[in-house]
Amino acid sequence: MINMVYTDEQGNLYDHPSLAACGRSGDQFLPLESSQVIPLPEGSSLVSLPERVAAGWDRRRGLRFVDQAVTERGCGRVYPVGVLLPQGFTRFLLPGFRRPSSTTTAAAGIGTRAGTSTTASMAPLPLYGYTAVGMRHDRLVVAALQTDEHHKWNPRFFNTPDLKERVSARLADDPDNRILRQLAKCSLDYSCFTAQNIFYQRWEGGLPVSPACNAACLGCISLQESECCPSPQGRIAFQPNLDEAVRVATTHLSSFSCDDDPIISFGQGCEGEPSLEADLIAQIIAQTRKTVSRGVFNINTNGGYTDGIAKIAAAGLNSARFSIISAAPTDFCSYYRPKGYQLDNVARSIDICMGHGVYVALNLLCLPGYTDRDRSDGGVECLSR
């Protein structure tokens, strides 16, 4: 059995002696099965989910909820646990929990649906990708699968003891560079890996350029409406100039400590939609290529501003990651809430990039209970062709 895990109010972790771990797919609660779990990946973060009631699974009685359990201080209030996976892993189930005053009735059948809450007083969680977790043979396991090579994103290579020194030294070399100051904040305050790579002078380094966006994504990590869930990062509040951007790009792509494929990447968590700054990005690529031929220019984009994508692709863009949640137009618009574009614009942007020889990838937002529904994935497969 994969045992349910929970934390006490001090954050200590426990496994339940008799209840199995339970996750959630959409509005269905499901027990974790051996076929869908892997050992907790190195670099994962365990997080307690406050103000919520943990869900467990009784093999005879089905879904059970636990808000009081045995801890090192006796029986006390306990909370569900989630895992934040490192890059390169795809989750199958969300953590199982409910609101404190929910009227959910436990049922014996697998696939029990969540009940309706009778209270709205529960602070929203920060916008992270939470994954269901359990304990098997004294080892933590998660409902996930490794889907990509993640060596360069292994957390052990980041937040090293010398990071602050590296940041200080780089800022001292270019003290007036606003982009570097932003990246320093992202590195030290938000632990952003692409920002840190600029100071480590290796791999994929972020170069934020756009304070504006043409979408209002429900899951935006840099700007949320008031009274909504807190954003994990803050968005840049300035428009970079060409000179400071080229200095960052040139230094990173020409660094001797970089490997054979250093990357400058537009479209970071601390900015809006980079293609809205198409003129600037095109100039950055052109100016940098006058002195540096190595390395890759990449853009992470929603693909909605087709004219901007066309200009950037023509300037010498090497790779593009297009964010997508669904190729069903209604679902697409419901999540992205696009301003002035539709899904057809994204498809045209992809075609334009491929016509320029740009390496194209789809960055699919995976939501258990939605992405794995039959009607939500066929369109993405079609779009990827």
Image (tube, grey):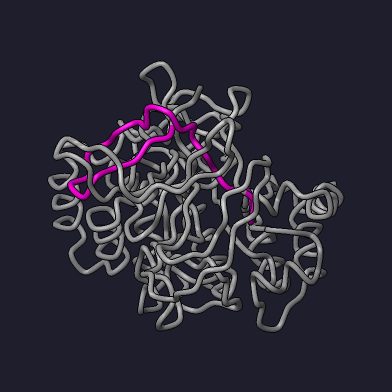
The residue lying toward the viewer, choosing from 300 and 285, is: 300
Rendered residue at 68%/58% (across/down)? 324
Q: Quadrant of residue 215?
A: bottom right
Q: Nearer the viewer, residue 239 or 60?
A: 60
Q: In the rendered image, is residue 320 in sight? A: no
Residue 319 in the magenta stretch? The answer is no
Q: Main secondary structure of the magenta part?
A: strand
- Looking at the picture, how far across and down is residue 232, in whole percent? 36, 63
Task: Name the residue at the top extreme.
Answer: 137
Residue at the image position 50 percent from the left and 47 percent from the top:
96
In the image, taking residue 190 as reference, residue 260 lies left or right, namely right
| Residue 184, percent from left and from top | 24, 58
Q: Which residues are magenta?
A: 4-28
- Residue at the spot x=43%, y=28% of the render? 18
On screen, residue 320 versus residue 347, left or right, reads: left
The answer to whether residue 247 is visible is yes
In the foreground, 201 or 305: 305
User: Is 160 left or right of 221, judged from the image as shown?
Assistant: left
State the image coordinates of residue 120 (x, y, percent, origin top left): 44, 76
